[in-house]
Amino acid sequence: MMNYVCQQCKEPLQLDASLVELSPSQYDMIATSLPSSPSPHTKHISDVEQPTQHPSSSSSKAVWRHANNPENIRHTALAHGKQLQRSYPAPNESFVILQDSVIHNIPSQLPSVGSTEVITNTGHPNNTTKGGSTTASHPQPESDYPNPTPISHHLRSTMRLFNLLSSRTDIDHPLCAECTQILLSSLQRKLDETRKERDGYIAFDKEVRKEKERESQETNRDEVEHKIERLKSEERAILDQLKFVEREREQLDEELRALELEERALDEEEADFWRLRNDQQLASANQTSLLVSLRAAYAADYATYEKLERTNVYNDAFCIGHDGVFGTINGLRLGRVPGAPVEWSEINAAWGQTLLLLYTIARKLDFTFENYRLVPMGSFSRIERTVGDKATYELYGSGDLHFGRLLHNRRFDFAMVAFLECLKQLMDYVKSQDSNIEFPHQIIKDKIGEASIKLQFSQEESWTRALRHVLLALKIILKWTTNGGNG
């Protein structure tokens, strides 16, 4: 049996059924569509290098070399061969039905099976095509085979077709589907590049034709020079006339601008006159209504002013008074006595309001305390030292008697002494601003008046009296601040 191999990747092939049933008319049609045979003195070029010898881009040459790499060809051909094995039956398992056009020269009496001619690759030593691949020997004319078998007839037809294709083209046949696809891709790229080159030549040819047409239309040099001189003289005359016309136009433009300015001034004067007249009428009409509205607004604003004069937002925000022996701020009692116990939550809240009042007054007066910084935080307010150990003193206490709470109450005493120091600084500042202001109780260290502000080791009545003196001093400073005594 004939074994066909691809002339590029050298992998075995299985022919399509259409080649087996190729009629003489189809063979003649294929032969007439092929180009003429190449020149015999053309130098032989290998299949791999052949596409690279033609003018084409470097990318197409690289693709062709990569496609003809033996490893790549073997891989693709094996994959295609497996696909063909799945798609077509084995040659010894298939049969074909021959048409009358194919077997018109085949005798009706077929020889026996034992006498069937079998052609193999090894049967003929001189069966090598121009590409170097091994195929069946060139078929002899059919007259040399008076009684050919159908199989040998088809083999000879197929081999004759392959030899014809190989001799008329630059590619050895047969080719597998994968190599054919690679060849078609390379030829398509070459076709595209050739089309681009053709378009460039066509464009260049058009330019050359246009240039020749322009040259053919040129007249005699002397005539052209004479015409140029005549046109130059006409141009000079026209330019002189144009300059004269432009001067006249400029004069007319100047006159027109002067007239436009005069007209615009008259229009503006007329518009101003009517505007003044309308404004005067509107002003005289609005004076009466404006006078009435101003009188009504004055009465309302004066009433509001008197109400605001009687209103003090600081007095509303920090209402300082007394409840028996206790000084109060916003209704919160500040202090403790044995006969009237006060919850520590109320005392801590009152201390928070007191610290907030001192902080607010200092901000309004733009006053900065020395060595201390106030941190008003409600019932958990505190005072921080800004120098030295930079300690923080909590300005809230508790009635617990355990050892940790005793230490906390000691810090509470330090916080109240620091508060008293800040209050003394503010009192001194107010006195420096207004010498007429007087405070009934003086502050000396931890005492205001004669009462100590410390809670530990002191009586609650003395501590409560000191807190009442603190609120009185704050009330005096607040009144001086809100009345504008600070300028």
Image (cartoon, helix red, strand yellow):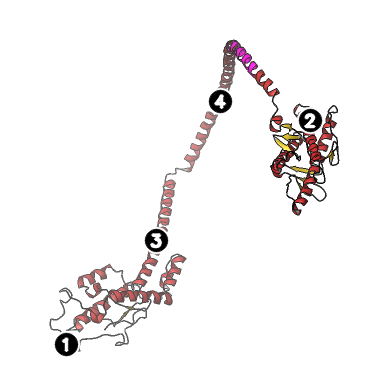
Q: Earlier in the sequence, mark 3 or mark 2?
A: 3
The kind of residue tagged 4 is Glu
Where disc 3 sits, the SS reads helix
**Badge 4: few (under 14), some or many (20 or more) residues near its Cα, within 10 Å?**
few
Comparing labels 3 and 4, the label whose residue is closer to the camera: 3
Q: Specify few, some or many for label 2: CA neighbours under 10 Å numbering under 14, 14-19, or 20 or more.
A: some
- Upstream in the sequence, badge 4 or badge 1? 1
The answer to which quarter of the image holds residue 360 is top right
The image's mark for residue 112 is 1
Tell me which amino acid carries mark 2.
Ile
- Examine the rendered structure and indicate whether residue 213 appears above or below residue 136: above
Which residue has dot 4 on it? 246
In front of the other: 105 or 358:
358
Left or right of residue 83, residue 280 in this image: right
Q: CA distance from mark 3 to mark 4?
A: 62 Å
Q: Residue furthest left?
A: 108
Q: Nearer the viewer, mark 4 or mark 2?
A: 2
Count neighbours of disc 3 (C-alpha within 10 A) and say few if under 14, some if 14 to 19, many if 20 or more.
few
As drawn, 430 above or below 265: below
Q: Main secondary structure of the magenta part?
A: helix
The secondary element bearing badge 1 is classed as loop
**Which portion, as a residue range, is magenta?**
282-300
- Quadrant of the drawing holding the N terminus: bottom left
> Alpha-carbon distance for marks 4 and 2?
90 Å
Point out residue 327 in the picture as x, y percentages from the top left corner. 75, 34
Question: Which numbered disc covers residue 192?
Answer: 3
Residue 476 tag number:
2
